[in-house]
Amino acid sequence: MGLMDFIKKQFIDIIQWTEDDNGVLAWRYPMQDFEIQYGASLTVRESQVAVFVNEGKVADVFGPGMYKLTTQTLPVLTYLKNWDKLFESPFKSDVYFFSTRQQVDQRWGTTQPVTIRDKDFGAVRLRGFGNYSYRVADAKRFHTEISGTRERYTVTELDGQLRGLMLQHISDAVAQSGIPFLDLAANQVEFAKALQAATAPAFEALGLKLESVTLQNVSLPEELQKILDQKIGMGMIGQNMNQFLQYQTAQAIPKLAEGVGSGGGGVAGDAMGLGAGLALGQTLAQQLQSGLNPNQAQAQGQGPAQGQPAAAVVPQPVSQSADEVLLLLEKLGDLKAKGILTDEEFAAKKAELLKKLS
């Protein structure tokens, strides 16, 4: 080396990264025309990791702290360079800093509906969105798998890859959670935990740790949303099946009457539909009558004669015709087909109604 070349060379005695740019995951210390002075000071701040790379091979890795660079603190690089213990000369090596801070409020979401398999409804299409956070956990692996020799690597550049990993594992998360599709909207925390567990290994393979996942919204297909609304409505009126059937019947009667008054369109337009409406109306009237309390019945002229004991007004069980029972069974069958009733609930109610035929 000529004297002028030696004079032109600049030697580094302090290596550090102030991390002044937000969103930078990896940053290469500028080494062009520089050599590192033997005994130079390396400062690695909290939430940082420094990696020395020699001729493309990762050598020594440093966590937070202050280090004096010697053969003792650079054992791997010393071995690769074949330095002996008397080494005290400047040397060249690529130095990369990595931010290990948690990268928060990263967004994920389904640009198109994701088809998943549900135990109740088979294949269904899901839309959802939320956010997640992660950090660089293995700087050596992240360097070899992702950032490489680039001068800097940012969160924005990695966003598309990680967003794809989140969406790729939604089906696995649904399967692992065991949550029925209709209950996903009410169990967002459990689903988010399942999505994190399903996706974490893919992040780990890149040298990252998936710290948290949140699900802010899950959208159900319109037809399943209607079924969910029915289940919610049923829960609001209680678990009394008779009450629910009365409610459904009361909703159906105006529609049947409207069909009759308009010339007989739809179900109410034929004799069977009209008969069904009358039978449902009769059933509703009987059930409502049986639920009247003594004071209400007496006020309507149906109470006991004056002086008759109040016990005499206790309503007697109302017998139901075969047609009425069959109509109720058909109604129950529709509810079971829509998923509102379980097989057990349907069987129990069916048995109860069939007893009335004997």
Image (cartoon, rainbow, N blue to C red):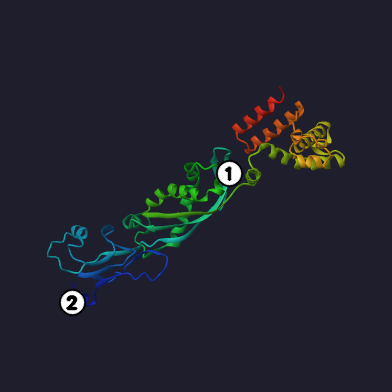
253 left or right, relative to 1: right
Question: Farthest left residue?
Answer: 86
139 and 84: which is toward the camera: 139
CA gap between label 1 and label 2 equals: 79 Å
Rendering quarter of residue 95: bottom left
Which corner quadrant holds the N terminus? bottom left
What amino acid is at disc 2? Leu
Residue wearing tag 2? 3
What amino acid is at disc 1? Leu
- Precedes in sequence: disc 1 or disc 2: 2
321 left or right, relative to 77: right
Residue wearing tag 1? 182
Image x and y of residue 12, in percent = 25, 72
Q: Residues within 10 Å of mark 1 (few under 14, many from 20)?
A: some
Above or below, 348 against 8 in this view is above
For label 2, the SS is helix
Rendering quarter of residue 280: top right
Q: Which residue is at a point 16% across and 59% down the rendered structure image? A: 82
219 and 345: which is toward the camera: 345
Image x and y of residue 268, in percent = 82, 37
Above or below, 206 against 254 in this view is below
Q: Residues within 10 Å of mark 2 (few under 14, many from 20)?
A: few
Which corner quadrant holds the C terminus? top right
For label 1, the SS is helix
Image x and y of residue 33, in percent = 27, 72
Examine the rendering and report whether any part of residue 82 can be seen.
yes
15 left or right, relative to 277: left
Examine the rendering and report whether any part of residue 37 can be seen.
no
